Image: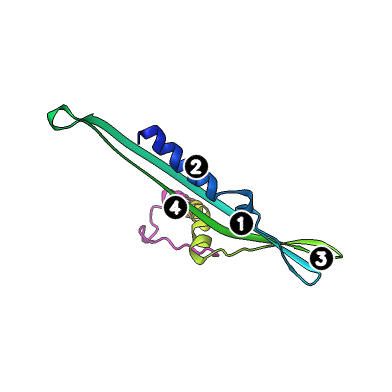
Amino acid sequence: MGLEDLMKEVSSELERLVSTKTVVGDAVTVGDITIIPVTKVSFGFGTGGGEGKGKDNEEGFGGGGGAGAKIEPVAFIIVSKDDVRMLSISGKSDIGVLLESVPGLIEKIKSMKGKKEKNKDSTATDNTNDSEVSVATEI
């Protein structure tokens, strides 16, 4: 199997795995209510290979391929007689919230450092410790 065949095989398997039924799941009906799951699908794949001559001028080939996929629920569409609603799943973890606050935190530190340097220049007799910076942020 050559490198091109390997890439075709990996991509066709991904195509088989990721379909519209994966993103918008099968509807489940309970009484007068129908629930339709909605998911987020992330995937990637890679292939690599090499050709060369081995011992006794024999042709050689080495190759590999791999793929990964992540399916994550993001919402449910709820259909009833009277209305249609979409319930979003917001499952942000603590680390996710922390990472989202990093850019704002960096700006606060820069701002405080700039103010401190400005104050240092204007008052030469200031007895503050230059290595101390206190930062408070809401997470």
Quadrant (top left/top right/bottom left/bottom right) for the C terminus: bottom right
Write down the residue under mark 4.
Answer: 113
Amino acid type at mark 2? Ser
Which mark is on residue 12?
2
User: Are there few (<14), some (14-19), or many (20+) residues within 10 Å of tag 3?
Assistant: some
* Label 1 close to label 4 by CB (< 8 Å): no
Q: Which residues are magenta?
A: 111-139
The Cα atoms of the two marked residues, 1 and 3, are separated by 21 Å
3 or 2: mark nearer the eye? 2
In front of the other: 77 or 61:
61
The Cα atoms of the two marked residues, 3 and 4, are separated by 56 Å
Would residue 134 be counted in the magenta stretch?
Answer: yes
Q: Earlier in the sequence, mark 2 or mark 1?
A: 2
Amino acid type at mark 1? Thr
Residue at x 67% of width, y 59% of height: 26
Write down the residue under mark 1.
Answer: 39
In front of the other: 70 or 11:
11
* Label 2 close to label 1 by CB (< 8 Å): no
The Cα atoms of the two marked residues, 3 and 2, are separated by 38 Å
